[in-house]
Amino acid sequence: MPYVSRVLGPDGGPIVAASDWVKTLPDLVARWLPEGYVSLGTDGFGRSDTREALRSFFEIDPPQIAAAALVALSRCGGIRASRAASAIRELGIDPDKTDPLSV
């Protein structure tokens, strides 16, 4: 069994990996992890003047990481979808925001 599977996979539940570099970096371990693995990344630079602005633009800042975890928990039955949606609103996240990769 691969090390990453032993360390991250046995307890179940979602796993969220975030990188302020390309999303393909955390995607490298996805095949050894259970369903519910979510990777977040910038997939590009040049759109922001600071790392903080970059993370916000590409939705990999702390509120977005929390939102990804809430959605993943909802999908695996850990919490109700309505609770996830409510918490995401409390985080101030606009669910209708344009996908940054399409801009």
Image: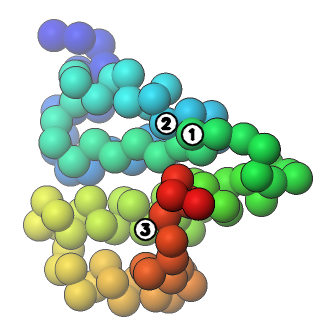
25 up-or-down from 50: above or below: above
Assign a secondary structure to mark 2: loop
Horizontal side of 44 relative to 41 (left or right) equals right
Chain-order first, disc 1 or disc 2 = 2
Q: Quarter-wise, where is residue 39 in the image? A: top left
Residue topped by disc 1: 43
In this rendered view, identify the residue nearer to me: 16 or 100: 100
Q: Is residue 90 visible?
A: yes
Horizontal side of 34 relative to 19 (left or right) equals left
Q: CA distance from mark 1 to mark 2?
A: 6 Å
Q: Which mark is residue 67?
A: 3
20 up-or-down from 28: above or below: below
Q: Residues within 10 Å of mark 2 (few under 14, many from 20)?
A: some
Chain-order first, disc 3 or disc 2 = 2
Quadrant where the N terminus sits is: top left
Q: Are marks 1 and 2 in contact (CB under 8 Å)?
A: yes
In this rendered view, identify the residue nearer to me: 77 or 21: 21
Given the image, on which type of amino acid does mark 2 rest? Answer: Lys
Given the image, on which type of amino acid does mark 1 rest? Answer: Asp
Residue 72 image offset from top left, x and y in percent: 27, 59
Q: Residue at x 66, y 61 (%)?
A: 57
